[in-house]
Amino acid sequence: MSKIPVLEIFGPTIQGEGMVIGKKTMFVRTAGCDYSCSWCDSAFTWDGSAKDEIVQMTAEDIWNRLKEIGGDLFNHVTISGGNPALLKNLNELINLLKQNEIEVALETQGSRWQDWFTQIDDLTISPKPPSSNMSTDFAILDRIIHNLTDHNRLEQTSLKVVIFDEADYQYAKGIGERYPQIPLYLQVGNRDVHGEDIDNLTSTLLNQYEQLIDRVVQDDELNNVRVLPQLHTLVWGNKRGV
Ligand SMILES: C[S@@+](CC[C@H](N)C(=O)[O-])C[C@H]1O[C@@H](n2cnc3c(N)ncnc32)[C@H](O)[C@@H]1O
Ligand SMILES: Nc1nc2[nH]cc(C(=O)O)c2c(=O)[nH]1
Ligand code: SF4
Ligand SMILES: [Mg+2]
């Protein structure tokens, strides 16, 4: 079996974001990203600061580690990163999880397609708004959505846009208009990804959440959107591995 670069395996915890928020899950976080978002809360996956922690693991190694720390306490695994969609061989892990009757979720930004996307039970595509300083290649994103549509995977798919400012909000609206057939989640952006004062962070994030709700409820062009905070950040702050 081939090797997958892994930075973290943790859980059981809850999925703190998006389409399956609250679901008990394990996490596998792969190393490496083709983006470098200005506000990335997982920059250690790509900025070199954790390069000594990267472990090259086979799918079987990863499964063994999941069982070692999660035991019988899970039936769902979320793969995140970095961008796990950089890894063609991730199908080996997905197949092994499925053989063991584990549901699989994936977090990616929509910059790359992999054929194994069609095997994912909860696929979150999170295109990046202007505040990230990244620019969306809509030719690629359109093709990803088109492929998922062709494979009848829209029920397993959602879009999630992180919102920091007005330009991000307008970008999210554009995403909603371009792909009206896909559930759209707006997620509160965390400006302070290194802060250690959790009470301060929680109250700031809840204020931002309230402001985003106020905006959306008054907007007749966003009647179908879902607005969420990052639950894990409200509970545990910026702690890693939760
Ligand atoms: C760390 S990323 C990894 C997966 C993939 N690279 C992506 O961006 O979708 C997981 C999710 O966290 C979100 N995220 C990253 N930094 C954030 C921040 N500072 N505040 C809120 N959400 C953030 C991303 O937008 C993405 O939806
Ligand atoms: N609990 C929890 N939920 C999450 N949802 C998405 C995460 C991520 O970093 O991709 C994440 C994470 O790191 N922890
Ligand atoms: S795409 Fe995801 S992992 Fe990559 S820099 Fe942006 S938020 Fe971070
Ligand atoms: Mg995270």
Image (spheres, rainbow, N blue to C red):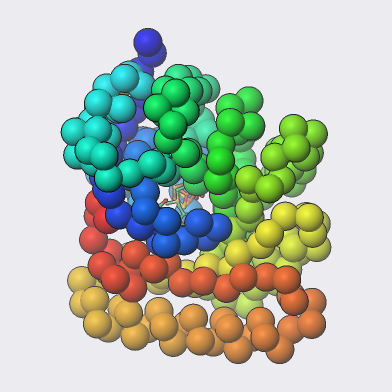
**Residue 3, horizontal then vertical, whole percent:** 35, 18
Q: Residue at x 44, y 31 (%)?
A: 101
Residue 33 appears in which quarter of the rendering? top left
**Residue 215, horizontal then vertical, whole percent:** 64, 85
Q: Residue most toward the top?
A: 1
Q: Please say if 128 is above or below 62.
A: below
Mark yes or no: residue 82 visible: no
Where is the C terminus found, in terms of image quarters? Answer: bottom left
Residue 15 appears in which quarter of the rendering? bottom left
Nearer the observer, 25 or 112: 25
Nearer the observer, 186 or 141: 186
Mark yes or no: residue 162 visible: yes
Residue 216 lies left or right of residue 24; in this view the side is: right
**Residue 159, horizontal then vertical, whole percent:** 63, 55
Q: Residue at x 67, y 66 (%)?
A: 172
Residue 44 lies left or right of residue 40; in this view the side is: left
Q: Residue at x 50, y 56 (%)?
A: 20
Q: Please say if 223 is above or below 238.
A: below
